[in-house]
Image (cartoon, rainbow, N blue to C red):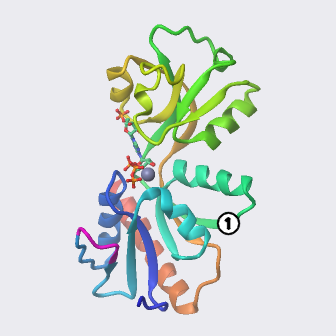
């Protein structure tokens, strides 16, 4: 059984945010022994437990109050918030800090040979993405009538596979787009990692621990600047 008095923090188990999130927790003095296979990691010097999950699950775990804190990319967070709004499920949370890692942008990209003057060029087209809610919001705010085709992976091959005309995917260096004959055209959402807290009131002990940890995060972040 897990101990409800311990602060529960969700981190991505294995992916682009994992190492930086764990490094930050260690840098603010939380000792952790992480065993690769295990879902839970207990801190040996603080009343803190880590829940190691897929990043897709982190916003919901925080919004449902299953964990107290979570490290997550704003792209995933915003997408899950829109999804929950659309289905009338709770989506409240507090952003405690924007972090200095996980930077990327969700962009529209089209095949090199496709003519693209503005987002209006997507009129009547199919756009493959893992972020249908963010993409549909972008279409709506630009008055474009296009459709989002949901793919959970390999989005960049969708145009070549004939599944979509264009894509809306995360970009950092742009190398993946280039390797797939695609050109970045419009930014839909700019993202970085954030630390979020459940909207549910926590015990005084937990809240005091969080309040002690936040200045340390600021210290670590400033020291890197
Ligand atoms: O298994 P799990 O579901 O936990 O992981 P995941 O595969 O969904 O996510 P992961 O680990 O790939 O990314 C986690 C988070 O990292 C994302 O939600 C973003 O907030 C952030 N991030 C930052 C990125 C990138 N940069 C990024 N470049 N996530 C993905 N990419 C991918 C992108 O999808 C594309 O395939 O990298 C490729 C593009 O990179 P460049 O450098 O070639 O442009
Ligand atoms: Zn994921």
Please state which of residues 71 and 52 is positioned toward the viewer in this rendering. Answer: 52
Q: Position of residue 12 (x, y in %)?
A: 39, 61
- The image quarter in which residue 29 lies: bottom left
**Residue positioned 25% across, 69% down in the render:** 37
**Residue positioned 61% across, 32% down in the render:** 148
Residue 146 part of the magenta-drawn span: no
Relative to residue 19, is residue 68 drawn left or right? right
Q: Position of residue 101 (x, y in %)?
A: 39, 51
Please state which of residues 68 and 88 is positioned toward the viewer in this rendering. Answer: 88
* Helix, strand or loop under label 1: loop
Relative to residue 211, is residue 15 drawn left or right? left
Q: State whether residue 21 is above or below residue 86.
A: below
Relative to residue 106, is residue 177 drawn left or right? left
Q: Position of residue 189 (x, y in %)?
A: 57, 39
Magenta-highlighted stretch: main secondary structure? Answer: loop
- The image quarter in which residue 147 lies: top right
- The image quarter in which residue 95 lies: bottom right
Name the residue tied to disc 1. Answer: 92
Q: Position of residue 86 (x, y in %)?
A: 73, 52
Ligand 1 contact, mark 1 (Cβ < 8 Å):
no
Q: Which residues are magenta?
A: 36-40
Locate the N terminus and report the quarter of the image it occupies: bottom left
Please state which of residues 40 and 202 is positioned toward the viewer in this rendering. Answer: 40
């Amino acid at each position: 059984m897990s101990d409800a008095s311990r602060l529960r923090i969700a981190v991505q188990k294995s992916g682009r945010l994992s190492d930086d999130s764990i490094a930050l927790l260690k840098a603010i003095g939380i000792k952790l022994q992480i065993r690769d296979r295990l879902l839970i990691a207990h801190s040996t010097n603080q009343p803190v437990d880590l829940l190691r999950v897929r990043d897709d699950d982190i916003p919901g775990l925080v919004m449902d109050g299953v964990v107290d804190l979570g490290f997550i990319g704003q792209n995933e967070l915003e997408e899950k918030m829109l999804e929950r709004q659309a289905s009338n499920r709770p989506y409240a949370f507090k952003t405690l800090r924007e972090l200095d890692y996980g930077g990327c942008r969700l962009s529209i990209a089209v095949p090199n040979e496709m003519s693209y003057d503005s987002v209006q060029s997507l009129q009547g087209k199919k756009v493959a993405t893992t972020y249908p809610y963010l993409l549909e919001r972008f279409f709506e705010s630009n008055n474009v009538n296009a459709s989002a085709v949901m793919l959970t992976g390999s989005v960049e091959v969708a145009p070549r596979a004939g599944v979509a005309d264009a894509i809306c995917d995360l970009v950092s260096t742009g190398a993946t787009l280039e390797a797939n004959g695609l050109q970045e055209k419009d930014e839909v959402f700019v993202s970085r990692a954030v630390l979020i807290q459940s909207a549910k009131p926590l015990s005084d002990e937990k809240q005091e621990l969080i309040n002690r940890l936040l200045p340390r995060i600021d210290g670590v972040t400033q020291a890197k600047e």
